[in-house]
């Protein structure tokens, strides 16, 4: 099933300057698209998480390659910022069609480099594609405001104008969706981008860049650099990069937020999470159980919106044995094997961290009705597999509750009432997502009103908003002001220019001056 897409992403990657086909006069620009061989001597090995075989190496772009990428973006910005809105819309429509056409190829790359199941990988691509769909509506999204006769014969207009070169730093867990959260919006707004994929999953970004080129993107709109800390520091510090988008862990988010802000950039950082659901006694039992199991263990728990904590109100903790049985029925296998429900976690280090957190919960007095630590997957004995794991009787001071596990582990807690459950969730420093399972409208409304997390599901376990809205995690899960995609994404990637204009007949003969503040 899996072809060698990753091989095309090996040592050769450094910079993408895309080819241009679109000009307002209908002529085609010269092809300046470059896939530049990196001169780097330093690489990060990319492993197939199901086998731990090395499938390619990501170069650490050299300083001069990174400088070239910014120079390419900066040069392209000077003309792209003046491109017509219809040109940008046409580019996005072509790109949208190409991603759809190549979604299988992208998904298969994700299976190979990230380990997720093929069906889940297709979801990763399609959720990213929805952002390109949104960008195809850029003419309405960029509409400004205007007011006629703000004063006699004076009108005020505001435009949303681009900000320049933007930077995007991406995580491993959504190799297609997260890059697509940023660069299409940035470019549709008239900016150009320097993007750094996760060094652990570089392939999807390279395929996306190839497709962008095929869609006819002008050279220099999308530039990809590779690496780890040095590339991150480069993006945070470079004076020609005006805004930085980051998605990843808390530690990196805090660092990138502080470092980029210190050099005067606007920054948006989506960080880690601990997403709780509340199970009310009046909930639809079978539906709630199946939703909790899917949302806790899907993608091997490696989603920032994974349901990692279930808070059972009253006697609903009697449902736990049925949740355990449902979790036992999930098939753990390599992502490309038909019928697999969850694949491996990204790396042996990640697996060890997950196992260590499970062990800590036992030592701290929790129970383990389902222990996925010893799982063996025939044919994939060297893979980073962890089976679905359920920890019960967890207390807020335990490490398995305090830390993001980012694996297929459901932490179960008890609360006497909805009020107690809400207090517990609000005391958690994270605020990415949360959900309640109930058939009582008043309970749902109380939950919506009082819960602090930024994305709330009512009988919806993973309430990730579609791009007509924005991804609105809060508290420790988000640093910044404008969120990713939707109207927030447009605001993040534009600045407002407000024009006040006076066109009055007879001005030529008016010689009066005023030194007072006009009111
Ligand atoms: P990560 O922080 O390890 O890596 C993300 C990016 O930051 C990578 O490009 C990496 O090269 C770089 N990086 C890593 N460590 C760094 C450091 N110390 N300093 C500077 N840069 C660094 O994250 P990951 O493991 O790739 O992704 C998983 C994390 O991302 C989880 O915590 C998950 O919750 C979070 N995440 C959040 C969202 C969201 O929208 N809130 C979405 C997806 C993932």
Image (cartoon, rainbow, N blue to C red):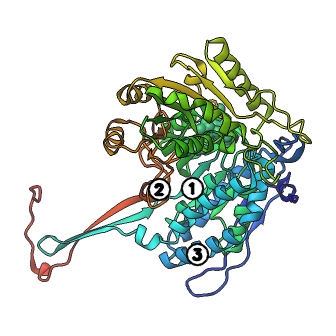
Establish if 325 lies above or below 398: below
Classify 51 as above or below 35.
above
What residue does disc 1 label?
181
Which of the marked residues, 3 or 2, is nearer the chain's N terminus? 3
| Mark 3 residue CB less than 8 A from any atom of ligand 1 | no
How dense is the environment of label 2, judged by Cα within 10 Å: few (below 14), some, or many (20 and up)?
Answer: many
- First-in-chain label (1 vs 2): 1
Q: Which quadrant is the C terminus positioned in?
A: bottom left
Res 277 label: none
Secondary structure type for disc 1: helix
Q: If the picture is divided into quarters, which one holds ligand 1?
A: top right
Label 1 to label 3: alpha-carbon separation: 16 Å
- Answer yes or no: disc 1 within 8 Å of ligand 1: no
**Percent position of residue 334, x then y:** 82, 46
- In terms of sequence position, does the residue under pointer 1 or pointer 3 come before the other? 3
Is residue 214 rendered to the left or right of residue 151? right
Spatial CA distance of label 1 from label 2 is 9 Å
Residue at label 3? 93
Q: Position of residue 35 (x, y in %)?
A: 79, 62
Which quadrant of the view contains residue 386? top right
Assess whether mark 2 and mark 1 are in contact (beta carbons under 8 angstroms).
yes
Q: Are marks 1 and 3 in contact (CB under 8 Å)?
A: no
Q: Is residue 504 above or below residue 12?
A: below
The answer to whether residue 14 shows anywhere in this view is no
Q: Is 512 positioned to the left or the right of 150 in the image?
A: left
Q: Residue at x 35, y 28 (%)?
A: 419
Pointer 2: what residue? 489
Where's residue 326, x and y in %? 66, 39
Q: Which element carries disc 2, helix, strand or loop?
A: helix
């Amino acid at each position: 099933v899996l072809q060698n897409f990753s091989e095309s992403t090996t040592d050769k990657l450094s910079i993408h300057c895309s080819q241009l086909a679109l000009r307002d006069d209908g002529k085609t620009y010269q092809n300046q698209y470059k896939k530049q061989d990196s001169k780097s001597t330093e690489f990060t090995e990319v492993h197939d998480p199901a086998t731990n075989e090395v499938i390619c190496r990501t170069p650490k772009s050299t300083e001069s390659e990174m400088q070239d990428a910014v120079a390419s973006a900066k040069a392209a910005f000077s003309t792209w910022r003046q491109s017509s809105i219809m040109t940008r819309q046409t580019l996005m429509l072509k790109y949208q069609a190409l991603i759809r056409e190549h979604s299988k190829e992208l998904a298969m790359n994700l299976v190979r480099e990230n380990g997720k199941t093929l069906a889940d990988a297709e979801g990763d691509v399609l959720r990213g594609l929805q952002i390109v769909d949104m960008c195809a509506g850029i003419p309405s999204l960029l509409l400004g405001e205007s007011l006629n006769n703000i004063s006699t014969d004076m009108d005020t207009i505001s435009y949303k104008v681009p900000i320049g070169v933007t930077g995007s730093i991406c995580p491993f867990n959504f190799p297609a969706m997260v890059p697509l959260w940023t660069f299409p919006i940035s470019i549709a707004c008239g900016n150009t981008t320097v993007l750094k994929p996760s060094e652990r999953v570089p392939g999807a970004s390279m395929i996306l860049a190839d497709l962008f080129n095929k869609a006819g993107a002008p050279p220099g709109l999308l530039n990809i650099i590779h690496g780890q800390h040095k590339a991150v520091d480069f993006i945070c510090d470079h004076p020609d990069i005006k805004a930085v988008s980051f998605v990843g862990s808390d530690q990196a988010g805090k660092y990138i937020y502080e470092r980029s802000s210190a050099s005067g950039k606007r920054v948006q950082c989506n960080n880690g999470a601990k997403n709780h659901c509340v199970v009310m006694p009046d909930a639809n039992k079978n539906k709630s159980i199946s939703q909790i199991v899917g949302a806790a263990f899907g993608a091997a728990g490696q989603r920032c919106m994974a349901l990692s904590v279930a808070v059972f109100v009253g006697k609903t903790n009697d449902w736990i044995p049925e949740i355990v049985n449902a979790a036992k029925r999930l098939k753990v296998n390599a992502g490309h094997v038909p019928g697999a429900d969850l694949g491996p976690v990204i790396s042996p280090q990640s697996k060890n961290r997950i196992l260590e957190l499970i062990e800590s919960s036992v030592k701290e007095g929790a129970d383990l009705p389902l222990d996925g630590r010893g799982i063996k997957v025939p044919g994939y004995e060297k893979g980073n597999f962890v089976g679905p794991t359920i920890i019960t009787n967890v207390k807020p001071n335990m490490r398995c509750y305090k830390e993001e596990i980012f694996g297929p582990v459901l932490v179960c807690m008890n609360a006497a009432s909805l009020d107690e459950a809400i207090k517990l969730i609000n005391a958690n420093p994270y605020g990415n997502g949360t959900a309640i399972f109930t058939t009582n409208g008043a309970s749902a409304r109380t939950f919506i009103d009082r819960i602090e997390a930024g994305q709330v599901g009512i009988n919806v376990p993973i309430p990730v908003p579609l791009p007509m809205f924005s991804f609105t995690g809060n508290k420790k899960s988000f640093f910044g002001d404008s969120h990713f995609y939707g109207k927030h994404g447009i605001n993040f990637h534009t600045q407002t220019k407000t024009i006040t204009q006076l066109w009055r007949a007879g001005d030529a003969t008016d010689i009066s001056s005023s030194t007072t503040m006009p009111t």
